[in-house]
Image (cartoon, grey):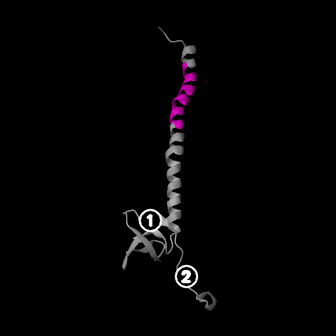
Amino acid sequence: MFITPAYAQAAAGGDTNSMLMSLLPFALIFVIMYFLILRPQQKKVKDHAELVKNIRRGDTVVTSGGLVGKVTKVVDDDQIEFEISDGVRVRQMRQMISGVRAKGEPAKEIIKDDASAS
């Protein structure tokens, strides 16, 4: 019925290995969550920031509210102005743009040559 000192020492030595094995599943769960959830989310945020940064005049954008319009003016680093209908212009925060449907070219001056007119 009595516990010998040798048996008590052996139980304490195995406790370190047992503790490591009990923490191993938590570490594996964290690694799996990182690769399946956190990393793709970080990539998505980075891609959205790049998309918003590259908006320019002439692009057709879709807002998070569902409005679709053509960018008429880039106001500053935080806002853009786009036209949703003839003569109806709206200012929107850049971060609220959910997508760019068609990349446009900036408006260029039309140069008329005498040779191309004939």
Residue situated in front as seen by the camera: 47 or 39: 47
Q: Label 1, secondary structure: give it.
A: helix
Q: Identify the magenta region.
A: 11-28
Residue at the front extreme of this rendering: 118
Residue 8 image position (x, y, % from top left): 54, 17
Task: Write the residue at 50% across / 60% down.
Answer: 48
Left or right of 97: which side holds 19?
Answer: right
Residue indicated by mark 1: 95
Residue 87 image position (x, y, % from top left): 36, 80
- The rendered magenta stretch, by its main secondary structure, is classed as helix
Residue indicated by mark 2: 108
Residue 6 image position (x, y, % from top left): 58, 14
Residue 37 image position (x, y, % from top left): 49, 46
Task: Write the residue at 51% across / 64% down.
Answer: 51
Q: In which quarter of the image is residue 110?
A: bottom right
What amino acid does circle 1 point to?
Gln
- Whether residue 24 appears in magenta in the rendering, the answer is yes
Position of residue 24 relative to residue 53, above or below, is above
Residue at the right extreme of this rendering: 115
Task: Write the residue at 45% across / 67% down.
Answer: 61
Position of residue 37 relative to residue 4, above or below, is below
Task: Write the residue at 49% across / 74% down.
Answer: 58
